[in-house]
Image (cartoon, rainbow, N blue to C red):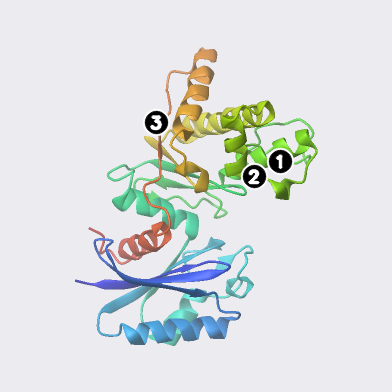
Amino acid sequence: MERILAIDLGGTNIKIALVDQTGHIWDKNKQSTPENLLAFLKVIQKETQMYADVITGISISSPGAVTGFGTIHGSSAVPYIHGINLKKRIEQATGLPVQIENDANCAALAEVWRGSARDKKDVAVIVLGTGVGGAIVKDGSIHKGANLHGGEFGYMILNPNNLGSKVNTFSEVASTSSIIRRVARRKHIDEKSLSGEKVFQLAEKGDEICKQAIQEFYRMLAIGVYNIQYTFDPSLILLGGGISNRDDILTGLNRELSAIVNDIAQATIMPMVQRCHFFADANLIGAVYHFLQKTDKHL
């Protein structure tokens, strides 16, 4: 069975895996992200030589806005990948066909292929972290948009008052870090002394400030989900990111969604929201699905 070398490129580490056409991972390793392009290409050359007898291509999960030609725009914690045709450089270094896709898009593709959105055609994925990222899957494929910003839900304005005050966009009011900022501001303490996990623990012990911050987070997350439902109208919306590991996140979100739908007379659709199935390996698996799609080999 054909196997693909999948690489998840991050700012601190890169993950490298040997993945087959069913999404099964046969081998995997992690190493520090190389400091420059030449070192990165050498790592890929070494890995391709190791698996030379079995791999037929390379697929990369990358930060940044990735064009169909393999150039990566924008900026990230890996600056040397931007502004060059990375796809062509890797193909020249290895002699193998290469595909590259944005990391959030790869995570979405993994869910459509083998995860919570399997067999769904129209799906939105919201990734909650320091900010809010995401991806749109339309007819089973990633929708990139005219400016490669398809699925960048974090830019949506949820609070129009005092634009630029850093409490306006979806990222600013519904990310995991937004909970921490609310609590730190009201308690007059340093944000660095808190974590999302600690805020939830304090809330469970009855801390009213933490309970209020979490309730506001759910409210703003619900507004964002509601807006996505009525603009894209997906059959499923998935939540990813570390906070999606919480068993109670859907309970809190659906409570606020029900209140919003009940308050708006014209609203008749209750968004269907689930958690992402894949976590650490999502980008690797999605990168391989992207490769198979682009080479017309997907199952």
Query: Nearer the observer, disc 3 or disc 1?
Result: 1
The residue under label 2 is: 177
Does residue 167 appear anywhere in the picture? no
**Residue situated in front as seen by the camera: 63 or 68:** 63
Say which element carries label 1: helix
In terms of secondary structure, where does tag 2 sit?
helix
Please indicate whether residue 232 sits to the left or right of residue 193 in the image.
left
Residues marked 2 and 1 touching at CB (< 8 Å): yes
Do the residues bearing badges 3 and 1 touch, measured as CB atoms within 8 Å?
no
Q: How many residues crowd mark 3 within 10 Å: few (<14), some (14–19), many (20+)?
A: few
The amino acid beneath tag 2 is Ser
Tag count: 3
Reading the image, the residue beneath label 1 is: 181
Q: Amino acid at mark 3?
A: Met
For the residues marked 2 and 1, what is the alpha-carbon distance in whole angstroms? 6 Å
Toward the front, the furthest residue is 205
Q: Quadrant of residue 199?
A: top right
Left or right position of 8 against 72: left
Picture coordinates of residue 149 (x, y %)? 56, 51
Residue 272 is marked as: 3
**Could you tell which of marks 3 and 1 lies nearer the N-terminus?**
1
**In-image side of 112 versus 89 (left or right):** left
**Among numbered discs 2 and 3, the one appearing first in the sequence:** 2
Badge 1 crowding class, 10 Å Cα cut-off, few under 14, some 14 to 19, many 20 or more, is many
Q: Nearer the viewer, mark 2 or mark 3?
A: 2
**In the image, is residue 116 above or below residue 103?**
above
